[in-house]
Image (cartoon, rainbow, N blue to C red):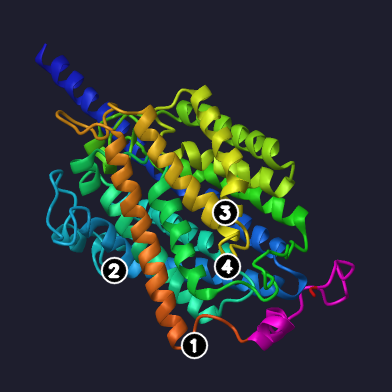
Amino acid sequence: MEEQLAELVAKVAELEAASKTTNTMFAETYYYLTIPLMVLIHAGFLAYEMGASRLKNVLASGVKNILAFGFMVPTFYFFGWWVYWAFPTGITLSEGPNGISGAAYASAIAWPWVEYMGPNIADNASGVFWGAFTLFAATTASIMSGAVIERIQVVGFTILAIVLGSFAWVVAAAWGWHADGWLVTDWGLHDFGAAGLVHAVAGFFALGVLINLGPRIGKFNADGSANDLGAHNLPFTVTGLMLIIVGFWGFLMACVIVPGEAWSWYGDKFATIYGTPITLSALSFNILMGFAGGIIGAWVMTRDPFWMMSGGLAGIISCASGLDVYWPPLAFAMGFAGGWLLKPCAAFLERRGIDDAVGAVTVHGTIGLFGLIMLGVWGSGYPALQGPDAPTISLVGQIVGAIVFFLLGFVPGYVVSLLLKSVGLLRVSPEAEELGLDMAKVPVSAYPEGIGMSAKPAE
């Protein structure tokens, strides 16, 4: 009898070990797959911005976007990842209530020389989780990139991209997208799909830059009216926007905490970054409903294919904060509202002399804050965090988060771009801009045999 009991205990232990290994391998594979899916976001931004540029600036827009991706990876490795784990409780860098933050914790797991930041064969978590966050960082830089096409210097843009992607956005994530984040623990902030802390931060960072960068030559007339400096290849731009949507599935997958050894503090269920429950089923319903609602809302307002596809993106962003709690018809309604609001909000900025070339400030900034705040209406009273006595979502808390995210984007965007402007590193010369950045800055031609030269030349 004792032998049989011992065999049974051994068998149970063996099964538990196998189950633990399977869960760990699943979690690692899951995050590994989110990374190439999120790379599609950058393929989309590349096509979107190159298509939206005039013929004389196509490759310059592409170079800038590629560099944004290239610089985000090492800078997020060397210091951005440390910032995320060090800053959740604020500038004091103290340990939070869940014990997974603060300077000491960050230094133990996130500096480049520690065991977790290299090929540690026993560690299934650090590299893939870091990789997913790195792609979030790269997304913020690409959002800003589209707003400033056709007149920004490469060096100035690269510096701005590093500040945004490896610091400003990361502080927002530490404060509002971490179980120890003070916006979460003190105010009950909830932003599952990062409408505020990724999109709004990047959008309003871009606004701060645009104020100092100024409009493209020829965009505005003496009376303040605006000219349409249209895309040279609208089909390419629209296709790029659809690729961004495809990549969004990876982005939102990576917002989910998968059960497994490395994420054991969230239990054995799928969870949000806050530890609250989520399922991939909920994402499937709500992403598609928000996307469709955004397309239809923009179509009702504009009938313009560019704004329709931008509306699809705005539709997802408008319901991103609450994708884990919304019922699908509500996600559709939020998406419709986001798509419908898009063009009027972009026109509001344009009437004030802001040349946001692809509408990035509106799509990501305005709509991101709209979605974040509206969750305070629809999700009020829902637990914002895992555990007993957890804070709950409230309209006040969401508004506080919106204000903080606006400032974390706009202030560094404005200040750093102003400093770059003062030393001549922000904008290209008028001569280079008139000639075209491809001719002035890029050593190859986008259309060496005249392909596409039937397009209307810039005036």
Q: Which mark is residue 424?
A: 1
Between marks 4 and 1 in the image, the one whose residue lies nearer the viewer: 1
Q: Of 370 and 50, which appears nearest the observer?
A: 370
Looking at marks 1 and 3 on the same chain, the residue that comes earlier in the sequence is marked by 3
Secondary structure at badge 4 equals: helix
Q: Which residue is mark 3?
A: 348
Looking at marks 4 and 1 on the same chain, the residue that comes earlier in the sequence is marked by 4
Position of 438 relative to 404 (above/below): below
Across and down, in percent, residue 333 comes to 54, 28
Q: Which mark is residue 112?
A: 2
For the record, the magenta segment spans: 430-457
Position of 397 relative to 168 (above/below): above
Looking at marks 4 and 3 on the same chain, the residue that comes earlier in the sequence is marked by 4
Whether the residues at callouts 1 and 3 have beta carbons within 8 Å, the answer is: no
Amino acid at pointer 1? Gly
Q: Residue at x 40, y 63 (%)?
A: 410
Considering the image in quadrants, where does the N terminus appear? top left
Amino acid at pointer 3? Phe
Position of 125 relative to 257 (above/below): below
Q: Which mark is residue 65?
A: 4
Which quarter of the picture shows residue 455?
bottom right
